[in-house]
Image: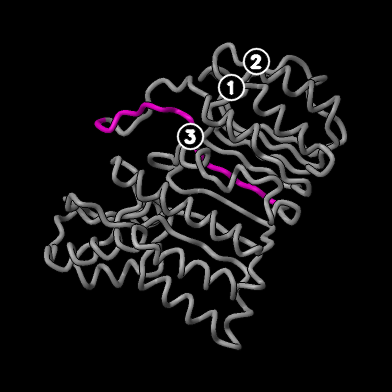
Amino acid sequence: MFSRQSLEALSDILSDDYFGPLLHTLVLGTDHLTTDLPLEDPVPFEMQMEAPAPCEEPNIDTTKYRTYLADQNNLLSSGLAVAYLSSIFSKAKNCKTLIIDDDHRAWGANFLKRETGVYPTTTLNSLESQDFIACAFQTILIELTASGLRIETFQVYAGCVTVPINPEILSPCPVLQLSPLPFATSRTNLALAVDSGDNYSLDSETFESRVESRSFHKISQALSLPCLQTLSLSVIDCTEDDLSWIFQNHRKSLQYINLDTVNIIQKGGTWNSLLATIRSQMQLRHLSIENCFQDEEDITVHGNEMIPSSISFQFRRHLRP
């Protein structure tokens, strides 16, 4: 997780002559403490699904909790996180995959549970949490870029099952203004599970009407990875043009496309038109479309002629032929 103790431990492990070279995949969790004490012990979504536990009010050591909260906030404000990440990325010579994930209990979370009486949270239900994750995310990208580490797979799954990371967290990042990115030519796999909706209801824990696609539009225009082979997009509101732009901008290398819970917004184009574009202009090996929508309605595909030939193609759920 993004804490001083976890980053120190990871840096020490990477310094080891035996264990250091064995790191090929690095997963950074979004676990963090918040100013408001939790009313119940936070549980990552994946753990809730595997073994749901009854909610009990935690017995929190307030003094220790506040101490670790101050330490967490100082990690970013003091520049200490920059120093740790610089050291980590400089040693992780064999790391090819970077994942930001909130579905599992991060390394270091159990330590905070023992110390404070409560686990850190992974949700983004407050502006404080969103600001912390945005700052941490941008710090990670900046240091990754500065290191010159040539990762091949970059995946962002944080928040996609609760309050998804908004692309606004990505778009202001100065790293994305660099052209080309130092690791752009080595990237062959990209997965983003984000949400472009600006409004959501905290009371019902469900999203309100999501029709704004400005944020994802910025990502679609900025994305340029010459060697990208696999692209996975989840929980996104967008236009046909946004998707078409990404696909065609990477058509020379792109072979596998996976779309899950993608909604083409009202007056934003159609899936039929997008499939026709893919059929005529793309040379894919595999196209997967699962749980996707047209203006929040089930997809209607008119005729098999829209389905690209010579590729493995699958629809799942919410499809009306």
Along the polypeptide, which appears first: circle 1 or circle 2?
1
Q: Considering only vertical position in the picture, is 128 above or below 47?
A: above
Q: How many marks?
A: 3
In the picture, residue 149 is in which quadrant? bottom right
Residue at position x 52%, y 30% in the image: 215
Residue at position x 43%, y 40% in the image: 164
Asked whether 21 falls inside the magenta stretch, the response is no
Q: What amino acid is found at the position of numbered circle 3 in the picture?
A: Asp
Cβ atoms at labels 1 and 2 below 8 Å apart: yes
Residue 248 percent across, percent down from the top left? 78, 31
Along the polypeptide, which appears first: circle 3 or circle 1?
3
* Left or right placement of residue 165 versus residue 206 in this view: right
Please state, as top left, top right, bottom left or bottom right, where the N terminus lies in the image. Answer: bottom left
Magenta-highlighted residues:
189-203
- Give residue 269's mark: 2
In the picture, residue 272 is in which quadrant? top right
Please state, as top left, top right, bottom left or bottom right, where the C terminus lies in the image. Answer: top right
**Front position in the image: 132 or 237:** 132
**How far separated are the C-alphas under marks 1 and 2?**
7 Å
Along the polypeptide, which appears first: circle 3 or circle 2?
3
Residue at the spot of label 3: 195
Residue 34 percent across, percent down from the top left? 24, 52
* Left or right placement of residue 271 versus residue 210 in this view: right
**Front position in the image: 304 or 160:** 160
- Give residue 264's mark: 1
**How far separated are the C-alphas under marks 3 and 2?**
19 Å
Residue 75 percent across, percent down from the top left? 34, 63
Q: What amino acid is found at the position of numbered circle 1 in the picture?
A: Ile
Label 3 SS: loop
In the picture, residue 277 is in which quadrant? top right
Residue at position x 59%, y 44% in the image: 176
Q: How busy is the neighbourhood of tag 3: few (under 14 within 10 Å), some, or many (20 plus)?
A: many
